[in-house]
Amino acid sequence: MEPETELAYNIASLPERPILTDQQIQELLGIPKTISEKTPAKGYKEENNQRRCDLELETTSDDGVRFSVFIRQNSKFIENFSIGLCYHTNLKSPGTVTLVRYNGAHGESSRHLDGHYAQSHIHRITEQEIASGSSQPQERHREITDRYSTFEQALRIFFDDFHVANYGDYFPELLHLGLLNGHQ
């Protein structure tokens, strides 16, 4: 199914405590996006034992929809990373909502019965979480995945999954990775 470039709602017209439905969250994830800014412009900055960078995304529509991406990787334990897609509502509540996080292994296995901390996993926010006041995907909504095992694979799959068209301009090493792993 081709994602619609115009949303069927205007977040500014929602009630004082807007609630995104699960369908609206899926629509937001499906909007075609391009990177308009990367901080730092080249590579990553080191801070608190993490390699990090942030991206501002644009959409093709003029409806004021804004997204950003945070990218964090532990400098010492490189399998421990988080890549998140944020939706900026321009409203005080809910404000910025992290729609999804692609995480690597955190190196722990005893924290949860499914052992997801020791494996690559994805957190997705739900309508129910937003309604309860959360703007972050919670621990209970996760899926263990074998779609990626490295930071670079996760980044490439993240950009493909969320329709970020020009990531190769900012992360050219991912284009080569895609050819080796069968991605287009």
Image (spheres, rainbow, N blue to C red):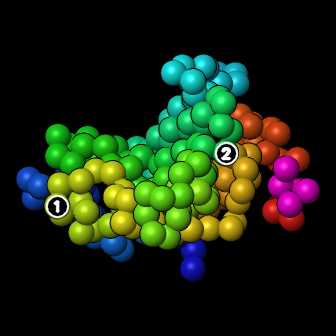
Direction left: furthest residue: 16
Depicted 83 relative to depicted 53: above or below: below
Q: Taking 103 as reference, is 47 above or below it?
A: above
Q: Is residue 10 visible?
A: yes
Residue 27 among those drawn in magenta: no
Q: From the top left corner, tell me how far across and down residue 79 is, in percent.
A: 67, 45
Which image quadrant for residue 10?
Answer: bottom left
**What is the three-letter code of the residue carrying label 1?**
Ser
Where is residue 171? Give x, y as percent: 74, 37
Lower position in the chain sequence, tag 1 or tag 2: 2
Tell me how far mark 1 sits from mark 2, CA to CA: 32 Å
x 56%, y 36%: residue: 72
Magenta stretch: give its range. Answer: 177-181
Apparent side of residue 45 relative to residue 26 in the rendered image (left or right): right
Identify the residue at image location x=21%, y=48%.
94
Give the total of numbered labels: 2
Percent coordinates x, y for residue 156 in the rendering: 71, 52
Residue at figure coordinates x 49%, y 47% from the top left: 84
According to the picture, the residue beneath numbered tag 1 turns out to be 132
Residue tagged by mark 2? Answer: 79
Amino acid type for the residue under numbered disc 2: Glu
| Of residues 59 and 137, the one drawn nearer to the viewer in this rendering | 137
Q: Is residue 33 visible?
A: no
Q: Is residue 181 left or right of residue 142?
A: right
Residue at point 20%, 43% (across, down): 91
Q: Closest to the observer: 71 or 94? A: 71
Judge by depth and name the residue closer to the eye, 170 or 76.
76
